[in-house]
Amino acid sequence: MGSVQIATTIVAAAITAVAVWLAVRAVSKMVAVIRLGQPDPARFTDWATRTRTMLAETAGHTRMLRWSLVGAAHWFVMVGFIVLSLLVLEAYFEVVSPTGGLPLVGNWAVYGLVTEWLGIFGIASILVLIVIRLRNRPTRPGGKSRFTGSTMWQGYFVEAVILGVLVMGFLIRGFKVATDHFEYPVWAAPLSHAVGGLLPNWEAGVSVAAVIKIAISMTWLIVISLNVTMGVAWHRFLAFPNIFFKRNPGRPGSGLGALRPMTSNGELLDFEEADPEKDQFGVAQVEQFTWKGLLDFSTCTECGRCQSQCPAWNTGKPLSPKLLVLSLRDHAYAKAPYLLAGGGKDLTGAEKATDGQLAHVDALALAEAEKPLIGGAEESGVIDPDVLWSCTTCGACVEQCPVDIEHVDHIVDMRRYQMLIESSFPSEAGVMLRNLENKGNPWGAPQNTREDWTKGLDFEVPRVGEVDDFEYLFWVGCAGAFEDRAKKTTRAVATLLHEAGVSFAILGEGETCSGDPARRIGNEFVFQMLAQQNVETLNEAFDGREQSRRKIVATCPHCFNTLGNEYGQLGGEFEVVHHTQLLAHLVATGALTPVQPVDGGVTYHDPCYLGRHNRVFAPPRAVLGTAVQGELTEMPRNSERSFCCGAGGARMWMEEKIGKRINVDRVEEAMSTGAAMVAVGCPFCSTMLNDGVNGKGAGEQVEVVDVASVLLRSVRPEQPPVDQKSAQVAG
């Protein structure tokens, strides 16, 4: 071993020792912070499915590849990072000896070939990602950047490290070629041989390049260890457990559909026995999130995909899902010294720790602990109320997140505390909640008018209890029973089912609101009151039936989602389909036959709770494909990336006071297609888009209509629309 090798060995050993010690300390801190969260035993189920899902999402990059160029580049960088670990390990042999290499595989041509090409693609890919970051930098004139609010130096630092390590790897190989110590043939390592042809015959160059490579790698480890909130780096390790412990590992769109039920200390909250002084009602302190929530916050990569898709952020609201998660992450780690010393408030607001326990806690941590989780700037709140209440729960953030952060659950958990304990929520929503409690519907309409939509139909709509048997229970929903536009859809669906010979029945006055708006706004108490009543009614309606015959069809995606995904939490197990799914089946089987295509161009708006939350994308398009003349014109944002109408998350009953109206933004996109008809599959979407069209003064040029009504026009072209017939009867 020469003097150069002695020096490089000492340097490599010293910097590695420091880096490893700091990394162990950092990991210990992160584990301690995450363990501050509440129990969540449901995460420890179905290990086989969790493992398969984790491997598919990481190795297969199933979520990242939705953004094809970025996804492909990131895949090569990810695989390259794993290979880099081997090459960094190999560098420790090379600092000792210029001819050193990994034992066993170090001289294997296949190993050389694989690492060579992964290195080449890795360099190309990291350059692509650097260019993308530069082109989307927040300071770039014009347009909104998904990196707004991200810590840009951290991203550039990580990318520079990866590039530096890869470049040094080829320099090491090049020096080995130049000194005739390289075992791989040209076909296995063409770039290395090309680099070697440019380098001098300097044997010590191998060890010098190797120690620089180690120094770059260990500098990276030191920097991230000193910055435990550096998600752009730590996600390389945390993404694996975060994906593994996702809420519904076997379900596409995990974290969407059903909301996570309210729990206290890991147990489901029973409102009949719950005590606000003993049980946790939502989240009021960052440590009241589950441990998985704290893992979510720690894992955020700051990529901004969620931000780029968020309807609130894109229309000038203060909510960015990314910035919300980063605020919670930074608050959790800043408050951690206080919590780890035994500090914290009990459910009555009293301090848990003694003065002695807190005596050595940093003043900054103590100050952080005094910040309210929800509060305005004057209160130094972590999350501003306008941020919390801007969310439509559309799920675009969860859909796009490459590491499966469950933003919607966290937002609703914070809403629950504000609603149930603080009674702090947008005042205009109070009318809706009172109507739900007193009238069983958000509009406050009389219950005895729930069946008025049946008047004027040329057939009798059967009621549950009046018929011996039926195939489907038709869940009409509050909008379908009371809102004028939605009643047209209800009548169209009933007419089509009758036309197809499908036996169905309605609950009529026995139906009440599914509870969706109450649950999404955070009033779990009202939701459970309504849901338990409905579960009891539905179980009675299906009494004696096996599971396969407990079928419900719903026209409202919010009802569809609540009945199908959430009533199971309360003992209501039903097979629920959306009306577009059933209509698509009836058309496909010949039970319904479109006889005259509807004229005019059409575009389709995917409702969030039908599409993203429940993966129903094809059936509405299949129906339109048979009922409309010409091709369906898709909006730029469609299917998984569809843009919200603005009504979800109980926003239907709140004023939109900040920024541009979400429905107007969506209507402008629909109108840009040139389509004369905007087809929908949701009564809320119908209301919001109709209002947007009228607000643009385009009511005569653009029609917003449900898929069922479009199909009915094609199946019964000679008859007036069912709403016109109703008016004729009434007249």
Image (cartoon, rainbow, N blue to C red):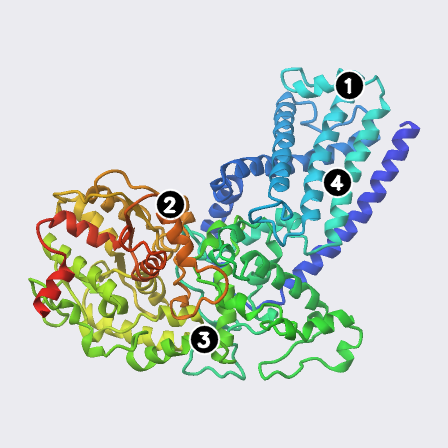
Mark 3 and mark 2: Cα distance apart in space: 48 Å
Q: Nearer the viewer, mark 1 or mark 3?
A: 3
The first of marks 1 and 3 along the sequence is 1
- Amino acid marked by disc 4: Ser
- Amino acid marked by disc 2: Ser
The first of marks 2 and 1 along the sequence is 1
Q: Quadrant of residue 25?
A: bottom right
Question: Residue at (40%, 63%) from the top-left corner?
Answer: 648
Circle 2 sits in a helix, a strand or a loop, which is it?
A: helix
The first of marks 2 and 4 along the sequence is 4
Question: Residue at (41%, 46%) from the top-left corner?
Answer: 637
Q: Which of marks 2 and 4 is in front?
A: 2
- Disc sitting over residue 181 in the figure: 1
Q: Nearer the viewer, mark 1 or mark 4?
A: 4
Circle 3 sits in a helix, a strand or a loop, which is it?
A: loop
Residue 324 pos. (x, y %): 57, 61
- Disc sitting over residue 672 in the figure: 2
- Amino acid marked by disc 1: His
- Asked whether residue 183 is in view, the answer is no
- Disc sitting over residue 217 in the figure: 4
